[in-house]
Amino acid sequence: MDEEQRKILLESVSRFPRPQGVKLSYGTAGFRADASILSSTVFRVGILSALRSLKTQSVIGLMITASHNQVSDNGVKVADPSGGMLTQEWEPFADALANAVDAEDLIRLITDFAKKENISFGADQSAQVLLGRDTRPSGESLLHAAKQGVNSIVGSVAIDMGVLTTPQLHWMVRSRNKGMKVSELDYFEQLSNSFGCLIDLIPQETMLQLMDDKLIVDGANGVGAEKLEELKKLLKGLVIQIHNSGKEGGVLNDRVGADYVQKEKIVPCGFGPNVVGIRCASLDGDADRLVYFHLLSESSNKIDLVDGDKILSLFTLFIREQLSILNKNESENINYDQSVRLGVVQTAYANGASTDFLKQLGLEVAFTPTGVKYLHEKAADYDIGIYFEANGHGTILFSEHFLCWLEAKNSELASVSKGSEQQKAALRLLAVSKLINQAVGDALSGLLLVEAILRHMGMSIQKWSEIYQDLPSRQLKVKVADRTAVITTNAETVVVKPSGLQEVIDAETAKYARGRSFIRPSGTEDVIRVYAEASTQEAADELAKSVALHVDRFLGFGSS
Ligand code: 16G
Ligand code: MG
């Protein structure tokens, strides 16, 4: 590092002093905390993003959001060149950078890391970081901190992409690195064109089936509502009513949004009894999660939740159907690849009934720990990898190899059997690959795919919900002295430490029909999470409670 670079860093670091006594860690969703203590962290993540851009010689993304957290929180995370999450290898450096005590410490860290990673500084180097933020009031000043961070690395430029959903920024990073156009309009056009394509390819028979066209969307009073309002203008044949747009005076994530709806299983604020039976969807605060629901009766606020597991199942049914049409080898000229590897990826939170359903379809179901980065990585192992967390975060990944194959097949089919069922199936799969965000789970693109598939299948939300019956489940959280004392394995289904705890969980679980329970330290809150499911709600509640008591006994404040 030359003198000039050192001087710039010394000067700029002192403008964003680190609050005393705060230790942050780059968790599954980046850094998150009360917005008032975050400027130094965001500034430093600006530096990190510029370094990452220098290292990869690609465009990097920096998103300022705290997703479904309360409005006074904020957070920051980095998008890698592929549009995915920051590589896990850099997370320890992110932690060290955020917690460096002063400018000298920070410069030392950067110098050592740059040496190790072979990153060169200087005016002949260039780095580019795309910045995005959600609608939180603290976003603007944190954006300023991020810009300063990026600019404090010589040769780096920060480009403000404005107020965006998290998946929009990830999409832009990915597209920019592929040499494609990345404006918001390009994003909206890609989604609306591919949605239109799927609608045009709906079989005549189902077109005639009566289906309720109307969809009501809970926008969590956040950025997703704003963007859906724009996107809506480009969509034909879809009636979307947006509630909780943030314009009616509601507060971001306050008793609204996908996280609230999924955990509480009640209607969000702003939804009256008149929505009974109507298809409703809920986005989270930065629009990377999506769940559906319908209100069961006018006299109660209880909903029938159609969660990420059921979205995953719906997507899987559709993709499988298209692959099986493609594989019907009608023409001698077309040698279809019979072995397209279709895989689904879930976490331990997936309802056991969904896993059974998918396995009964003959599918390979893989499990990973909680957190998009793990699911995404696993899904990328397949030709078509579909992943979802029960909380509504997920997408479908198509391998480049498979897409090339599909493009070629489509061209072949277009010349030998244009308009055939097989060609339509190829076109549908190609449209899905463009509609569904390849960078990260995206509530807006997910919503359009759900809507297209429901129309394709002539399926109501009630019918969709009935594809299998969820097993009753319960989630609890336990405050403990030190949550890092819990170490798990096997995709978080087995506790390794503290020793003896797994044995008591097993003993409790064995008491219940279809019992299943696991615990894990939360990545976003200072708690241990407990999950239990069983054949009845009472049993699931009891199992969760007894496991929580054991957790408290092993790890609570009273334990030694
Ligand atoms: C974050 C993760 C989400 C995960 C959740 C678990 C991303 C983008 N988001 O929101 O995937 O389900 O954390 O939270 O990775 P927990 O660790 O507090 O249970
Ligand atoms: Mg989110």
Image (cartoon, rainbow, N blue to C red):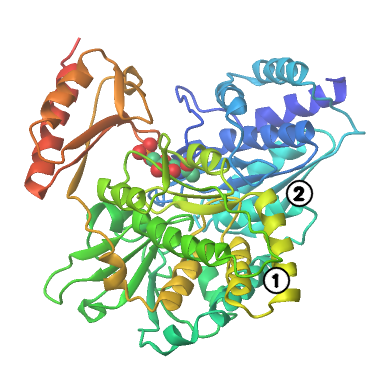
Residue at mark 2: 177
- At 61% from the left and 23% from the top, the residue drawn is 93
Closest to the observer, 532 or 313: 313
Residue 443 located left or right of residue 464: right
Q: In which quarter of the image is residue 495?
A: top left
Where's the C terminus, which quadrant?
A: top left
- Estimate how packed mark 2 is, as few (under 14), some (14 to 19) or many (20 or more) residues with alpha carbons within 10 Å: some
Rendering quarter of residue 436: bottom right
Q: Position of residue 398 (x, y in %)?
A: 60, 52
The residue closer to the viewer here, 526 or 378, is 378
User: Which residue is the site of mark 1?
Assistant: 413
Q: Distance between the residues labelled 2 and 1?
A: 31 Å
417 up-or-down from 34: above or below? below
Image side of residue 315 versus residue 492, left or right: right
Q: Which residue is drawn at 47% across and 60% down?
A: 320
Q: In this view, does 464 lie above or below 502?
A: below
Res 253 seen here? no
Q: What residue type is labelled 2?
A: Asn
Image coords of residue 410 (percent x, y):
70, 67
Please indicate whether residue 244 sits to the left or right of residue 17 in the image: left
Q: Which residue is drawn at 10% across and 40% down?
A: 513
Q: Which of marks 2 and 1 is nearer the N terminus?
A: 2
> Any atom of ligand 1 within 8 Å of the CB at mark 1?
no
- How far across and down, in percent of the image, does residue 137 sit? 50, 55
Please tell me how crowded label 1 is: few (under 14), some (14-19), or many (20+) other residues with Cα within 10 Å. Answer: many
Label 1 SS: helix
As displayed, is residue 430 above or below residue 66? below
How far across and how far down the image is residue 359, in percent?
35, 48
The answer to whether residue 113 is seen in the rendering is yes
